[in-house]
Amino acid sequence: MFNKRRSLGFSAIALFAGVATTAICLASPGAPVGIDGTAIADTPPDPIPLLLAGRTWLNGRPTPETLRGKVVLVNFWTYSCINSLRPLPYLRAWQAKYRDRLVVIGVHTPEFGFEKDPAKVRRALTDLGIDYPVVLDSDYALWRQFGNQGWPGFYVIDPQGRVRGYRVGEGDYAAIQRLLDAPPGDIPTVDGQGIEKAPDWVDLASPETYVGFDKAIHFRSPGGLRQRRSFAYSPAPDLPLNHWDLSGRWTVGGEFATPDERSARIRIRFHARDLHLVLGTPQDGRAARFRVLIDGKAPGANHRTDVDPDGWGEVRQDRLYQLVRQTGAIADRTVTIEFEQPGARVYVFTFG
């Protein structure tokens, strides 16, 4: 049964789902509603005090007075995650258009160790144009209190301070729409560019692929991964779709792998429009130069933000790097990344 009350909070989630709406309906008071229409398990009954108790805030700390009478959209995210980056145009647009009625709060819960550094998160906020408040959740306290299950997570809190809806992750927007009565209305125009461009779901046939041994799958070099010791790897004689290998000397840790010599390479066979790679600088902080090849050739028009048409790029920050965007028909491709010096950290391939 639905209660005919208007709520900008659900309007915000409907916008993320690609629905043109400002007038929508909340479920009747009671348990909050998830994307499958069922109650959310273990969601805090009084979430605002939990949020405001966060110790470290960037872009200012909200107060009960600034939140009073407003809808709060809580976004669990982490700055190197492509799934967290692609919704940002929507969050920025909603915050700007509905500033008098809506407060967006980011909860930055890190996936990798480098994302726990407040200075790196602060730089990411500047680079990404995020001006709404962000609380650092490096110990996963808020993540656990909200019962969050992935990046990105979105929780709508109504003006009475109750969680009234949520979604976790990209896609499956029809499931959100089933919770809403969403007539056409005035919404911001959102057109993500560069790394924030919406994924090509139709041609996306490659999953995120971790390089650290804690989560590594589909590794193809002969003999498998050697944990936490330098080893000279050989390339696989064949590389099926969504498999990867190493060549040259590497050290593979739990979160990341590090090339131990010049010209060490990592390859992956993928099928997607976009290919990204999370990279970190060497321990001494210097830049690490690398080159990207697609099927053994320079990327040319298929290069993207962080490499030039000849495939050259540099690791200067710990973040996600966009390496490839196929401009023609999407096909299976083999991408090789060769490092000009040792020391960079290689975390995870993601696609779009």
Image: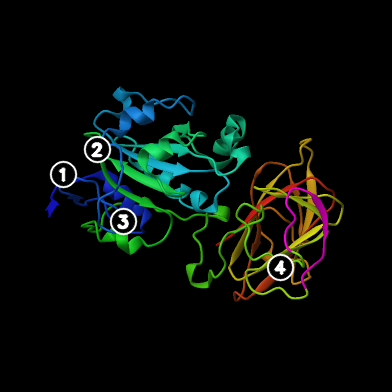
Q: Residue furthest right?
A: 262
> Which residue, given by chain and number where applicable, does mark 4 sit on?
220
Q: Nearer the viewer, residue 347 or 58?
A: 347
Label 3 sits on a secondary structure element that is loop
Q: Are marks 4 and 1 in contact (CB under 8 Å)?
A: no
Measured Cα–Cα span from mark 2 to mark 4? 49 Å
Quick check: 48 above or below 165? Answer: above
Type of amino acid under label 1: Pro
Disc 3 designates what residue?
35
Q: Position of residue 43 (x, y in %)?
A: 30, 41
**Image disc number at residue 29:** 1
Residue 327 in sight in this render: yes
The residue mark sitting in front, 3 or 4, is: 4
Question: Is residue 235 found inside the magenta-colored segment of the image?
Answer: yes
Q: Position of residue 111 (x, y in %)?
A: 55, 44
Which label sits on residue 162? 2
Looking at the rendered structure, the kind of residue marked 4 is Arg
Q: Is residue 116 left or right of residue 172?
A: right
Distance from disc 3 to disc 2, alpha carbons, whole Å, reads 17 Å
Label 1: which secondary element:
loop
